[in-house]
Image: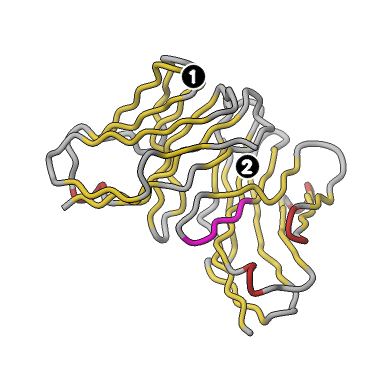
């Protein structure tokens, strides 16, 4: 079984500041990890994913995430927040024993202040 | 680009009605999913399907059923709608391997009066 914990249901940053959204997972086998973004009244869109290989993963819109096995973490960062980054962000984990299902975190709402 | 289309963005139904939510994907994906999304509860899996006519219960299947007669289409059925089924419903699809991300529709906001 696997689980995902997103620390902080709401994060607020100023425009131009660093964005850090935290995600920790638990799984008994090597996981596949994803970050999705959801803008108001839309579905989720993939930001980035880690499957194998390089542990620092770059995604769309300047976001990146680093897979740290020793810390069971996959935190999402962006050096400089933009107003358009305001959205809800979901971390998800999938296992190769799970027939395509993912387990999603509860989400973190990012607010960007001018 | 993968497109997942949900038939309605907004839907209002009455208690006791049978409600159908339709979802179509255009990328020949094996897996399809139905979630509901409620404030503070994240995404909860209702049902998923890994092939035509195959389905598996998710975390909250009670009060719902599904149908997958064709690979591209996955329907969610509320057998007798109740007010506690008022929610945002999201459909998703993914390829056949577990390292594939899910592709989501824009959601159906369903209100049961």
Please give the name of the residue rendered at 49% of the width and 42% of the height, measured from the top-left corner: B105
| Residue A24 image point, x, y percent | 65, 54
Q: Which quarter of the rendering shows the C terminus of chain A?
A: bottom right
Please give the name of the residue rendered at 84% of the width and 51% of the height, measured from the top-left corner: A56
- Up the image or down, B39 lies above or below B29; here it is below
Please, what secondary structure does the residue beneath circle 2 have? strand
Magenta stretch encompasses residue B21: no
In this view, the residue in front, B86 or A24, is B86
| Residue B84 image point, x, y percent | 23, 50
- Residue that lies at the very extreme toward the right in this rendered image: A54
Quick one: label 2, few (<14), some, or many (20+) residues within 10 Å? many
Which residue position holds label 1? B71
Left or right of A29: which side holds B87? left
The magenta-colored residue range is A36-40
**Quadrant of res A78:** bottom right
The mark lying in front, picked from 2 and 1, is 1
- Residue that lies at the very extreme toward the bottom in this rendered image: A114
Which residue position holds label 2? A93
Subunit of label 1: B
């Amino acid at each position: 079984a696997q689980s995902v914990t997103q620390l902080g249901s709401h994060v607020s940053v100023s425009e131009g500041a660093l964005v850090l959204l935290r995600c920790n997972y638990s799984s008994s086998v090597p996981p596949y990890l994803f970050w999705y973004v959801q803008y108001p009244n839309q579905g989720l869109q993939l930001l980035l994913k880690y499957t194998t290989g390089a542990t620092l993963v770059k995604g769309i819109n300047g976001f990146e995430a680093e897979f740290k096995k020793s810390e069971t973490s996959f935190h999402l960062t962006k050096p400089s927040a933009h107003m358009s980054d305001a959205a809800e962000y979901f971390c998800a984990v999938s296992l190769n024993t799970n027939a395509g299902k993912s387990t999603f975190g509860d989400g973190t709402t990012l607010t960007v202040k001018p | 680009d993968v497109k997942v289309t949900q038939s309605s963005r907004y839907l209002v139904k009455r208690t006791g009605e049978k409600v159908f939510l339709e979802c179509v994907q255009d990328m020949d994906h094996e897996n399809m999913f139905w979630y509901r999304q409620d404030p503070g509860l994240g995404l909860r899996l209702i049902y998923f399907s890994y092939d035509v006519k195959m389905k598996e219960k998710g975390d909250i299947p009670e009060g719902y059923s599904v149908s997958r007669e064709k690979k591209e289409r996955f329907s969610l059925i509320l057998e007798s709608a109740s007010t506690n089924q008022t929610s945002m419903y999201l459909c998703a699809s993914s390829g056949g391997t577990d390292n594939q991300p899910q592709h989501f529709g824009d959601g159906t906001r369903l209100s049961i009066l």
